[in-house]
């Protein structure tokens, strides 16, 4: 089975940097995804890691350590619009890309 | 706009009603998914269809009945639901080959069961 842990809530200041951590225990790991979900909206894809290391995409970066079962999402130059829930999801092996999600981290960006 | 649409966006139904949720994807994907999202709980995978065949049923009660008539359309038929079934129901689609095929989500149907 899969077990995914991430903090429930975080608060950060506009312009700052915030790191959202995710730890997982899984069988058959086949990649880790980060999604952003604004209240009342669909989750939208942010990043994907399957190999160890850092993937950078503009203001957002995601890191993976498979040996530690650990990932983080790094958000730089925070903007008010970044206030949202950030969902960590692990993909298992199989015919279809089955994703198991964490409960999400609600990020509040303040002035 | 993610290319995945869902109707209706909001639905209120009684426990004796029968209703259906519809999902359509315009991305050329061949796998489709139903998820349930309840407050303060992780997204829960309900059903997976790959190439129009159901490949996953995550112990979902029989009052939820999925249907995938083709690779672009997915339905969730609802009957005799319970108040605890009130949630956001999200549809997603992806390619079902290779590694790292990303799932794209629709806007969801907010369901309230009275």
Image (spheres, coloured by chain):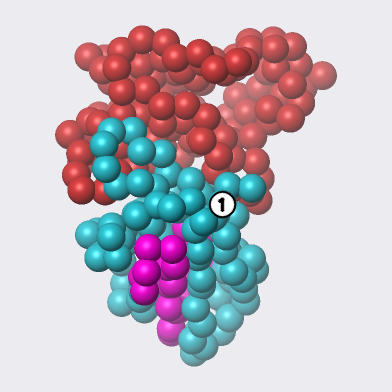
Residue that extends furthest to the right in the rendered view of this protein: A111
Q: Measuring from the top left, give residue A102's x and y in whole percent.
A: 41, 37
* Residue at the image position 43 percent from the left and 78 percent from the top: B77
Count residues near mark 1 (Cα–Cα under 10 Å), then give few for <14, some for 14-19, many for 20+: some
- Vertical side of A51 occupied by A6: above or below: below
* Main SS of residues in magenta: strand
> What colour denotes chain B?
cyan
Q: Is residue B47 left or right of residue A82?
A: left
The residue at the point 51 percent across, 63 percent down is B24
Chain depicted in red? A
Residue A110 on the magenta span: no
Give A29 or B62, whichever is nearer the viewer: A29
Query: What residue is rendered at 49% in x and 86% in y?
Result: B18
Start and end of the magenta stretch?
A: B68-91
Q: Is residue B37 left or right of residue A70?
A: right
Tell me what residue is drawn at x 30 percent, y 65 percent. Answer: B52
Residue B12 rendering spot, x and y as whole percentages: 62, 76
Quadrant position of residue A50: top left
Is residue B95 visible in this depiction of the protein?
A: yes
Quarter of the figure with the C terminus of chain B = bottom right
Magenta stretch holds residue B79: yes
SS label for mark 1: loop
| B16 relative to B37, above or below | below
**The furthest residue to the front:** B28
Q: Position of residue B50 (x, y in %)?
A: 28, 57
The numbered mark 1 sits on a residue in which chain? B
Residue corresponding to mark 1: B3
Q: Nearer the viewer, residue B50 or A61?
A: B50
Q: Residue furthest bottom?
A: B16
């Amino acid at each position: 089975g899969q077990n995914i842990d991430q903090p429930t809530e975080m608060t950060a200041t506009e312009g700052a940097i915030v790191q959202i951590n995710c730890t997982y225990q899984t069988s058959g790991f086949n990649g880790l995804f980060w999604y952003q979900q604004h209240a009342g909206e669909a989750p939208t894809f942010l990043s994907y890691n399957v190999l160890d290391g850092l993937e950078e995409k503009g203001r957002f970066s995601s890191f993976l350590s498979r040996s530690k079962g650990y990932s983080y999402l790094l958000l730089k130059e925070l903007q008010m619009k970044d206030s949202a829930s950030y969902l960590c999801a692990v993909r298992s092996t199989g015919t279809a890309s089955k994703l198991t999600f964490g409960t999400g981290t609600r990020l509040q960006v303040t002035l | 706009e993610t290319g995945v649409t869902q109707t209706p966006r909001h639905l209120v139904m009684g426990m004796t009603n029968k209703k259906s949720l519809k999902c359509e994807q315009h991305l050329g994907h061949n796998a489709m998914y139903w998820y349930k999202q309840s407050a303060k709980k992780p997204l829960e995978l309900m059903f997976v269809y790959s190439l129009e065949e159901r490949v996953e049923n995550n112990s979902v009660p029989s009052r939820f009945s999925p249907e995938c008539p083709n690779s672009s359309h997915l339905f969730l038929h609802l009957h005799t639901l319970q108040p605890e079934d009130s949630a956001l129901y999200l549809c997603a689609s992806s390619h079902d080959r290779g590694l790292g095929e990303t799932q794209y989500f629709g806007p969801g149907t907010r369901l309230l069961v009275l």
